[in-house]
Amino acid sequence: MRTLIVFYSRTGTTATIAKSLANRLDADVREIGCGRYAGGLLHYLLAGYDSVRGNLPEIEMTEFAAEQYDLVMIGTPIWTSHPSLPVRTFLNRKPELPARVAVFLTHGGHSPPQTCIDELAELLPVPIEAKLTFNSAQVSDGKFADDVADFANELESRSHR
Ligand SMILES: Cc1cc2nc3c(=O)[nH]c(=O)nc-3n(C[C@H](O)[C@H](O)[C@H](O)COP(=O)(O)O)c2cc1C
């Protein structure tokens, strides 16, 4: 299974999961860069302000060839119940994606992830094949390896069906 992981992470939580999945699946990785929200409290507040208003930021990301992959996994933190703005910018550009897309989310535990998943589903050109969510405390406590392994196993077993 040739897998690409595309993710955005402001403070490293989603990046930790992306790297763990990439190791487990031997996947390629593309990080979405976004200078607008890189920094401390003011940037956090700006992210919240923009997120509520849907102000999509500029992003930086290396091109990829979708046809080289069987599966793309998209990782994002939840921002004000939405996918993070850099991921919304990425998906609004209507990138070419393979038929198989999975998503993983990290969040602070103060909003149900379903709103974010529904929004990702609306932005994606194909149905979400699988999804996984992580509480940021779970990630900082290092308690995510089993969930990552189960998720990777599930995706690999589907590719053999
Ligand atoms: C602007 C902003 C808005 C957020 N909104 C939510 C939210 O609505 N619900 C929630 O559970 N966590 C929320 N969080 C917390 C993040 O989803 C959580 O800390 C996430 O794991 C951060 O991922 P990262 O370290 O990869 O950036 C928000 C964080 C930011 C910066």
Image (cartoon, rainbow, N blue to C red):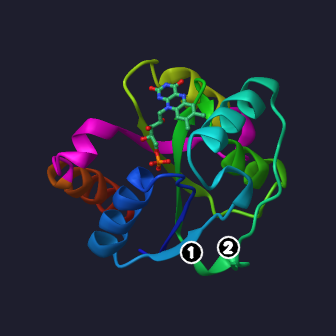
Q: Position of residue 154 (x, y in %)?
A: 28, 52
Report, in whole angstroms, how far the alpha carbon at label 2 lies from the one at label 1.
6 Å
Which quadrant holds the N terminus? bottom left
**Can residue 56 be seen?**
yes
Q: Is the CB atom of the residue marked by disc 1 within 8 angstroms of ligand 1's nearest atom? A: no
Q: Position of residue 41 (x, y in %)?
A: 57, 39
Check the image and report above or below for 70 versus 11.
Answer: below
Question: Would you say 7 lies left or right of 65 here?
Answer: left
Label total for image:
2
Residue at figure coordinates x 59%, y 53% from the top left: 39
Residue sitting nearer the eye, 62 or 127:
62
Which residue is identified by label 2? 66
Q: Position of residue 102 (x, y in %)?
A: 49, 50
Circle 1 crowding by C-alpha within 10 Å: few under 14, some 14–19, many from 20? some
Check the image and report above or below for 53 versus 62.
Answer: above
Q: Quadrant of residue 82?
A: top right
Q: At numbered mark 2, what does the secondary structure look like: helix, strand or loop?
A: helix
Residue sitting nearer the eye, 45 or 103:
45
Residue at figure coordinates x 70%, y 79% from the top left: 65
Disc 1 residue type (three-letter):
Tyr
Q: At numbered mark 1, what does the secondary structure look like: helix, strand or loop?
A: loop
Residue at figure coordinates x 54%, y 52% from the top left: 10
Which residue is identified by label 1? 69
Q: Quadrant of residue 100?
A: bottom right
Tell me the magenta residue range.
122-144
- For the residues bearing labels 2 and 1, Cβ distance under 8 angstroms: yes
